[in-house]
Amino acid sequence: AQTVTQSQPEMSVQEAETVTLSCTYDTSESDYYLFWYKQPPSRQMILVIRQEAYKQQNATENRFSVNFQKAAKSFSLKISDSQLGDAAMYFCAYRSANRDDKIIFGKGTRLHILP
Amino acid sequence: GAVVSQHPSRVICKSGTSVKIECRSLDFQATTMFWYRQFPKQSLMLMATSNEGSKATYEQGVEKDKFLINHASLTLSTLTVTSAHPEDSSFYICSASRAGGVTGELFFGEGSRLTVL
């Protein structure tokens, strides 16, 4: 069975600084997707960034980028120039590329932005 | 973008009554919908997977007679909490997989907070 592990329950970063959230996963599959979702106090799940396992190039979305290490099964999220609006719960997630399979979430990392 | 609407966003009911939560994909067809439960400060726990026109698949430990899921069309899935009790109070979130989608992304509803008195 696939698992997703986030080892940092909480993290803090100074505004405008850079922070990296860690995520590791376990799977025997070769084709899958990885995601980082943000859940602000409103509790709406917001997709931050996604990565297809077959792509070697790390995904980037503006201030958000990932370090995808497929062999190590690691998928960290880097947030540059942190802003107050980045404060939220961040979930790392795995989804098999098999059609309509479920998403498996990590336990989450709560990110605090210090003004 | 793909929009998933969940209704109601908040519901308060008396113990012993049943509550229905709707999850609609507004601008796409959803072959599969997923229902999650989230306790305070915890992650999302998958309850069940529903496919249009077939019975839902429940995760281990989830009572299928307590949490009835119906996926009657490609745009609507409902979760009914039957004979609700205070321990069923929680935040429930649905998500939908777009038919023919190639990105693997799931689209989430806004969530429904259930409080059972």
Image: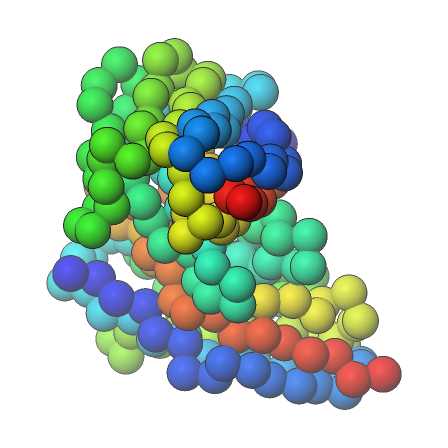
Whole-percent x, y for residue A4 in the image: 32, 68
Q: Which of the 4 image quarters holds residue A39?
A: bottom right
**A18, above or below A29, in the image:** below
Whole-percent x, y for residue A24 in the image: 34, 75
Residue found at x 20% / y 57%: A30
Inspect this view and state whether residue B1 appears. yes
Inspect this view and state whether residue B93 appears. no
Q: Nearer the viewer, residue B72 or B68?
A: B68
Residue found at x 33% / y 49%: B46
A61 vs B44, left or right, is right
Whole-percent x, y for residue A17 in the image: 74, 85
Number of residue marks:
0
**A30, above or below A13, in the image:** above
Quarter of the rendering occupied by the N terminus of chain B:
top right
A14 vs B87, left or right, is right
B20 vs B112, left or right, is left
Residue found at x 46% / y 39%: B15
**B75, above or below A98, in the image:** above
Q: Nearer the viewer, residue B104 or B50?
A: B50
